[in-house]
Image: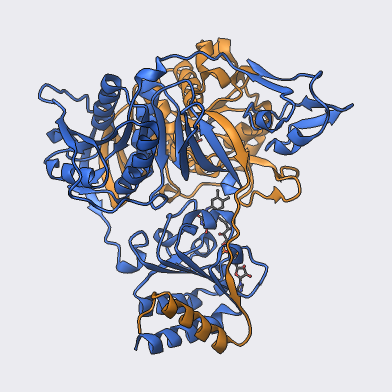
Chain colours: A orange, B blue
Amino acid sequence: MKIVVCVKQVPGTTEVKMNPETNTLIREGIPNVVNPFDLYAVEEALRLKERFGGTVTALCMGPPSAAEQLKEVISLGVDEAFLISNRAFAGADTLATAYTLSKAVEKVGDVDLVLCGKQAIDGDTAQVGPELAENLGWAHLTYVRKINDVTDGKLVAERMTDEGYERVELQLPALLTVVKEINEPRMPSLKGMMRAKKAEIPVWGPEDLGVEADRIGLNGSPTQVWKTFVPEHRVEGEIFTGEVSEQVKALVQRLIEKKIVSV
Amino acid sequence: MGIRVLSDKCVGCKVCVSACPFGAITVVERKAVIGDACTLCGSCVPSCKFQAIELTRSEKVNTDLASYQGVWVFAEQREGRLAEVVLELLGEGRKLADTLGQELVAVLLGHDVAGLAGELIAYGADRVFLAEHPDLRHFLEDSYTQVLTDLIREHKPNIVLIGATAAGRSLAPRVAARVRTGLTADCTGLAIDPATLNLQQTRPAFGGNLMATILCPNHRPQMATVRPKVFKALARDDARQGEVVRVDLAKAVFDLKARILEVIKLQEGPSVNLQEANIIVSGGRGLCDPKNFKLVEDLAAVLGGAVGASRAAVDAGWVSYPHQVGQTGKTVGPKVYFACGIHGAIQHLAGMQSSDIIIAINKNPEAPIFKVATFGLVGDALEILPALTEEFKKAIG
Ligand SMILES: Cc1cc2nc3c(=O)[nH]c(=O)nc-3n(C[C@H](O)[C@H](O)[C@H](O)COP(=O)(O)OP(=O)(O)OC[C@H]3O[C@@H](n4cnc5c(N)ncnc54)[C@H](O)[C@@H]3O)c2cc1C
Ligand SMILES: Nc1ncnc2c1ncn2[C@@H]1O[C@H](COP(=O)(O)O)[C@@H](O)[C@H]1O
């Protein structure tokens, strides 16, 4: 089986902080990491390879520094990795990203399965996976929590729904986005780290992929950020202090007044 | 294509430096310089009072924009019941449609679902496209994308709104990619720009620390997904009139690359039914210990409410993921929301801010949760919770 995993470089923090004076994100000292959900996709690809044989290729579109994240997934056991990087790709929204990645998947060639994370923690859109599948003309499933089997050009997987889950059979080639319930990602092996250290990450630009110039980067992105602002939260609340018993009585009284609690 | 600073206009005021979420702008010799960290996001452009930053893209308008008319809502149904978010989208869609002077259309796909059309009209739709076919009985990306894109191509809507449910978040990008238009995920605000009539789509970015308003000026339809419980449904009005248009699928052939083998519903107890609860009592890391979570459950039980949690409490394994409220959990909007030992991180606020009354219990008076609280109790939740449970028991009798 030839598997591609899409991994994204994201700022490595769960607590993105704002500088209250300038209203900007504090980025200093925040290292970049592999999007956490993508590590589950990498792990699942490695497990499929162990079960059914084949190869695992990682793709990332991002700045030159994202080569580090590709090296990290090589240390986990990914066979080869390509960085899609060029100023012409900058400013891409999910549509342009998905189109670009689809050309890269085609360049890898003869791919049976693409795995993505459920979403990227910086944008949280969860759109690139399904849009990539559409560009490839393949079937896709989102929120996959288990891959049951792969036989005869078909795959059976379980996807989460709002009410539970479904078992679905898909024709290959296909694309899945995975949730963290699917597995427990491994740690890098010593051998893997050695291999990662030496690995050269080839960089693909627009010519390598044969992309249409007006479908990549800023020009290929229908959505435009018009403005950004810091959300305001203040409401005129009533704060009780003092003895617990008094606070509690005061609150219940207010809720009775507001007819939330009926006596 | 690209970004540049017009140095004759730039006065070196540094406003753009703070507007850049990526810290890519510096001022050198009183002129702004845009560095390599720039992602061409465009945040700096409107911040400049001197029009000194120019972001150029090939403004290729690829469709005849004015021919796209109407606001559409995807009427997601499961086993013949409309998803709650559909009614909320109709409520918001009604406002957008009225502002634009265009019609509000619900698009209903399924099998044996004609009975729902009247409900969609009662909640605000002027027109319902009803597409019934055995292959549409259950949601599948292949068949649903095909029907929805065919309808979009034929009728050219201006705006398409889809609930950010599990199904909606899978369908919407597939459709957007097929019609090659933009899609904004998880919007929390929608408005029409009076000057251009474009849809302003506001959504959280960077974990909710920043809000971004997104436009899709040169492509139609303008598509957005919206999380449940963000907008309010209109009151049901069965006297409302509307038209039901049956979509002819007699000859439809679906290229189904997927087949559902089994549907498993997990029974959620009333304590996890967060989206329908009137009262939610949520606990966070401030409860200090898994056994103290019982205090939250006790209060919820007395009030007949559901139990929620912050991500920290879920990550610590004190309570399961279906209870998580916030950006990566559920969005809720109950009458009363209790936040017990919850700090009020922006990602948590993103999921509960629209609650009518917010009650914060926290021992740190500086905790940001107090900024959104209608009522705040400053003190130890481990003492306050049992006392509150007792007091409510007395009050309710
Ligand atoms: C992309 C992203 C998505 C996220 N999604 C979510 C999400 O969906 N939901 C979510 O909740 N979080 C989410 N988070 C995490 C969020 O940033 C916070 O880490 C989390 O909400 C903190 O939970 P907490 O308030 O319970 O814990 P803490 O931050 O540890 O706060 C505990 C609070 O309890 C108070 N306290 C301590 N002891 C007591 C006591 N005895 N009595 C009373 N008060 C006490 C403390 O003063 C403090 O305010 C997300 C983060 C990121 C980056
Ligand atoms: N620039 C990128 N390079 C590689 N993979 C990506 C990129 N952007 C998104 N993805 C993949 O798509 C998934 C969803 O991303 P998003 O739609 O941005 O939330 C991620 O988990 C990745 O697997």
Figure quadrant of the N terminus of chain B: top right
Residue B235 sits in quarter: bottom left
Query: Please, which residue is most extreme toward the right here?
Result: B29
Q: Is residue B25 above or below residue A218?
A: below
Instruction: Look at 80% across and 24% down and name the residue there.
Output: B10
Q: Name the residue rendered at 67%, 28% in the picture.
A: B45
Whole-percent x, y for residue B77 in the image: 23, 45
Using residue B39 as the reference point, say whether residue B138 is left or right of it.
left
Residue at (37% x, 80% y) in the render:
B302
Towards the viewer: A2 or B53: B53
Q: Is residue A164 left or right of residue B184?
A: left
Q: Residue shown at 29%/49% (left/top)?
A: A165
Vertical order, B314 against B302 (above or below): above
Residue A1 position by quadrant: top left
Relative image position of residue B152 (x, y in whole percent):
30, 24
List x then y, in percent, for residue B105: 27, 34
A169 relative to B285 in the view: left or right: left
Query: Which x, y percent locates residue A176?
Result: 38, 35
B151 up-or-down from A25: above or below: above
Q: Is residue A141 visible?
A: no
Name the one closer to the observer, B312 or B247: B247
Q: Nearer the viewer, residue B109 or A111?
A: B109
